[in-house]
Image (cartoon, rainbow, N blue to C red):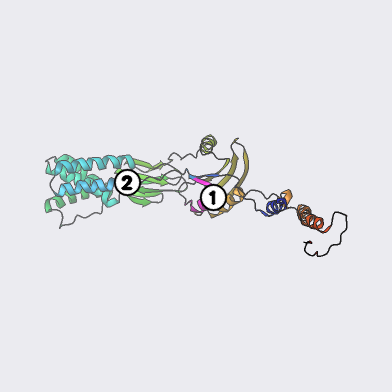
Amino acid sequence: MRTWPLLLVLVLTAPAAAAPAADLVVIWAPGMRTTPVESAAKKAGAAVVDRSPVQAGTSQTAQVLQRGIDAFDKLDLDNAWQALEQARSEVVRSGAAGLSRAQLSDLFLYRGLIKAQQGDTTAAWDELVVANTIDPTRELDPGRFAPKIRGEFERAKQTVQGKKRAKLTLQLPEGCTANIDGVPSASSAELVVGSHWINSSCTDRQPFGYKIELTDDVTVPIDPARFLPPSDSDLLVQARTAGSRAFVSVEVRSGVATARLVGLDGRERDRRTVTVTNDLEPVADALSELLTPPKVTHWYRSKWAWAVGGAAVAAAILVPLTSALVNDNGNATWGLRGPPPQ
């Protein structure tokens, strides 16, 4: 039995599985939700690696501070001071990131209370002044603090309220937010002169913390170091390590997303550039275009190939049939024959 006509039909009709133009997508989109881009890549059959900078985790200073307060309430002054010293170091390093104004004021209030318990009245006074400088309107709870403590705190408050005020102005990069003494601040604040803490957060920059001794009106420029995207060399190493044929780099900077299709020779083959706000859906559409291979019409899918293939199939069927109908003498007629003679 001849099987080649059947194989020809299968070749002509079998669908061709189209591989994506790249089998690796590397994303760098600081502070943005990458789900739309990841979904588009996976739908096209490409693997995804997110190289976006990891945002700083929640500060643990508040927990350390609370541990110190709890130890003070148990009159465990040594452990209380140790925890509050650790919290103060973190506050200086981070600009009080993760603390509210009340918590920041508490840090120095309880440090002052410990020093008062230890008989160091000068150090206690200094700590109470700092606590009131942070929050000059604070009132102590009579149910929690003894009259003597409240009296000393009020005396420090009166001293602070008698000091002059100065304007602190922050110059922030676009897309950054800042806190002054644990309070969100747009650009400036009128503060009592003394110690204050600043911290900023940016989607594409490193965290920034700063302690300032405010004495007069001042402008503080805040310019944290930028996070840098991976270089093409890094991406090529990653793609080759993963055994990829090509990769797409998706990079978002200042509201503009660029998707580039790059071969393992380092040459850019195609790119798409789109404007984005808070959503990467437009980038997902651009990525789908890059990953979709160009349509190629194979010779066996053209109408002429189908015509020739159809003729070949017809011939494959008719030739054996014709051979069966023609006898050895070339006579094309035939009839039913009876059983052979006995």
Element marked by disc 2: loop
**Picture coordinates of residue 287 (x, y %)?**
57, 49
Camera-side mark, 2 or 1: 1
**Amino acid beneath label 1:** Ala
Mark toward the start of the polypeptide (2 vs 1):
1
Q: Which residue is mark 1?
A: 41
Residue 160 visible (yes or no): no
**Amino acid beneath label 2:** Ser
263 vs 301, nearest the viewer: 301
143 to the left or right of 134: left
**Picture coordinates of residue 134 (x, y %)?**
28, 48
Q: Residues within 10 Å of mark 1 (few under 14, many from 20)?
A: many
On-image quarter of the C terminus? bottom right
Which segment did they paint magenta?
Answer: 33-48
Element marked by disc 1: helix
223 vs 215, nearest the viewer: 223
